[in-house]
Amino acid sequence: MQEKAQAWLGNLLDWGKSRQSSNAEKLYVEAIRLARAPHFYQKYGVADSVDGRFDALSLIVILLMRRLKPLGEEGKVLSQELFDSMFADMDLSLREMGAGDTGVAKRIRVMAEAFLGRLNSYVQAIDKNDKKQFSSALKRNLFRGNETIDPVANGLVDYLFDLVEKFDHFSAQALLAGRITVT
């Protein structure tokens, strides 16, 4: 019996190590690091709440997915894996906060739908290089209609376009290997 338990634990630990070492997980860890940067909350006015942190993380993951899209089949697969990593983490986080199975499934579905809506509006604005459209999308989503925050005036839109440029300069090889660090 003890041998079975040790084997099960070993398999679980191996799964955790392989999951953490996947290229999607490496990109996800970088996205988390960027989304948790204090300037998002202190300088740009993102709400330091569960919703605000979800929106900041969604934003960074969307920027990464946008960069992965033109990298052929490998980029599309990695983009999907990045999305899957994020929502597996969201599922785990909700469970840790005490949500039950039924509640988690409903919340994850709502979060995924919100994410996909943001993906379309953010990418469209970025690809058009339309700062006004991007600012409007950020006001609707990241700032949830808080009209006192102007993402153009406070510099967030410029910061995000600079971040897009940094992502765009990473080589396809580095991105597909999950080897990026933004300074």
Image (cartoon, rainbow, N blue to C red):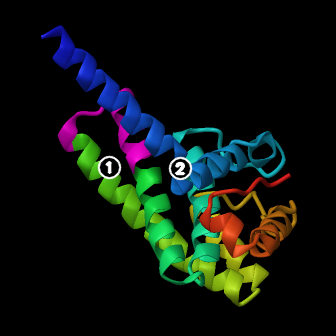
User: Callout 1, which amino acid?
Assistant: Arg
Can you give x and y, in whole percent of width and height, for residue 12 in the image? 32, 30
What secondary structure is found at the residue carrying circle 1? Answer: helix
Q: Which residue sits at x=37%, y=38%?
A: 15
User: Callout 2, which amino acid?
Assistant: Glu
The residue at the far bottom in this view is 128
Instruction: Tell me where residue 137 sits by quadrant.
Output: bottom right
Q: Is residue 95 left or right of residue 139?
A: left
Residue 89 located within the stretch drawn in magenta: yes
Q: Which residue sits at x=20%, y=14%?
A: 3
Q: Residues within 10 Å of mark 2 (few under 14, many from 20)?
A: many
Q: Which residue sits at x=84%, y=47%?
A: 43
**Gap between marks 1 and 2 measured at Cα:** 22 Å
Query: Which numbered mark, 1 or 2, is in the foreground of this view?
Result: 2
* Residue that label 1 marks: 107
The residue at the far front in this view is 3
What secondary structure is found at the residue carrying circle 2? Answer: helix
Can you give x and y, in whole percent of width and height, for residue 167 in the image? 75, 69
Quadrant containing the N terminus in the rendered view: top left
Q: Which residues are magenta?
A: 88-102
Q: Which residue sits at x=81%, y=45%?
A: 39
* Residue that label 2 marks: 25
